[in-house]
Amino acid sequence: MATASSVTSPQHSSCFSIFRRDPAANRETLLSFGLRSRHNQIRCESLRSSSESRVTRRGEAVVTAAKKRHQSPERCAAEGILIGGGEVEVAREVGTLIPERMKVVMLTACMMCLCNADRVVMSVAVVPLAEKLGWSSSFLGVVQSSFLWGYIFSSVIGGALVDRYGGKRVLAWGVALWSFATLLTPWAAAHSTVALLCVRAFFGLAEGVAMPSMTTLLSRWFPMDERASAVGISMAGFHMGNVVGLLLTPLMLSSIGISGPFILFASLGLLWVSTWASGVTNNPQDSPFITRSELRQIQAGKPVHHPTSSSKPNPSLRLLLSKLPTWAIIFANVTNNWGYFVLLSWMPVYFQTVFNVNLKQAAWFSALPWATMAVSGYFAGSASDFLIRTGHSVTSVRKIMQSIGFMGPGLSLLCLNFAKSPSCAAILMTIALSLSSFSQAGFLLNMQDIAPEYAGFLHGISNCAGTLAAIVSTIGTGYFVQWLGSFQAFLTVTAFLYFATTVFWILFATGERVF
């Protein structure tokens, strides 16, 4: 034992002497004793600190560049502006997923398709109902306009609810309720005329939230230079609803009966609600599915941050009506609804009475203009976005699009008075409706321009006036046809209304923020 002890002691003494004399050996020795992990941790902390420092410096550089370019820091970062000879690095998620905002706009387009298809079902089904129940042309106009009685009341309230709660919840309730009303329509028609009018009024009450919900939701999900295209896609769905309703309804009426198309579209509406409730949020930043790069792109394209909730009360009605740009929107909505509902409600009847075509043929002639309108509406939106991206002012773009949207239909309706065949009439109606879709990039978007925080409320006010005009025009067409025996006089009145509103719009509309 003594020998072992005497041998070990010099060895330990030698090791400690080496430890003191050779620092390099000391480092290797410590690492061999398990201190390598601590070394790596120190190195990682150093790298992390260096990275955070670089990010901070780049963030400061982005803010500085944004001030020089008079843009938001988010837009500068999203565009990858050159700062000090180096490009700002923007993280991009790798993948081939469809952008979340495209999913939102496609679901919105499907909703708008159902919205209009549910209206058109009644426009076609009312022809056999009128023959069965012996309705006159004037009372036929009353039945056609009945859904507008509820629509006029829900426009303002619906717009205010959208501003407060967002488009998702309000739209879900609206689609569920109008689908239920659609399901009840054939029962109400079989029960009594009063019941039918009440159900159609309730149907319009639920549908009144669709347009303000659509425009407000898309304004939150899309940057400024994509907004017109998004509205164009949604309104393309709206116009395709006319096509679907006009083509499917006569087939189902002849094969299944009056209840068939109503049950079909009501079921599709309830299916849509179940998909919408789980897949969409009011704002992109609340979505669990959106990528960071897409969110940055959306936020960078918005010059002003819009509050996501009602942090401020809606402005008074007196204040809104004190500005001429508000009246430009109201008059445009009145004229647009006047002409639109005349053609929507009376087109099948027009072809049947003027050219003596049967219901199925009238449906085909009526469907062609709406199909073309869906395509032209998207083209108008894309053209509007292109003009804004290339430096044209929002005001000039809105005036150009709206002028095309009114002057074109006005001239086409004047020419329609001289149509001698259903084919010629269908061509003129196609031109009228195709050009009227340019209004989507005019007054329909202008509400977000002049009152971004109160667009739903403003939309409700203008839509209320437009709905009143639609009621007058729909009923008035029936009385004109009954008194004069033709559609010509009313088409001429509608054409001159288009011309007068165009002049007012050019003089007083603006793309600048007013409220």
Image (cartoon, rainbow, N blue to C red):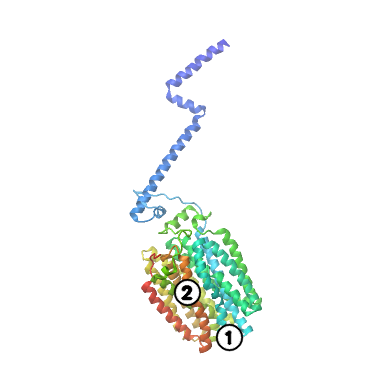
Observer able to see residue 340: no
Pointer 2: residues within 10 angstroms few (<14), some, or many (20+)? some
Observer able to see residue 68: yes
- The quadrant the N terminus occupies is top right
Pointer 1: residues within 10 angstroms few (<14), some, or many (20+)? some
> CA gap, disc 2 to disc 1?
27 Å
Identity of the residue drawn at 48% across and 52% down: 292
**Could you say where residue 288 lies in the image, as x and y percent from the top left?**
53, 54
Label 1 sits on a secondary structure element that is loop
Identify which residue, 172 or 30, lies in the foreground. 172
- 359 over 234 or under it: above or below: below
In the rendered structure, which disc, 2 or 1, sits on the residue that comes first in sequence? 1
- 5 over 433 or under it: above or below: above
- The quadrant the C terminus occupies is bottom left
Relative side of 511 to 130, left or right: left
Which quarter of the picture shows residue 359? bottom right
Residue under label 2: 465
Which numbered dot is residue 136? 1
Label 2 sits on a secondary structure element that is helix
Dot 1 amino acid type: Ser
Identity of the residue drawn at 60% across and 69% down: 179
**Could you say where residue 78 lies in the image, as x and y percent from the top left?**
42, 54
Dot 2 amino acid type: Ala
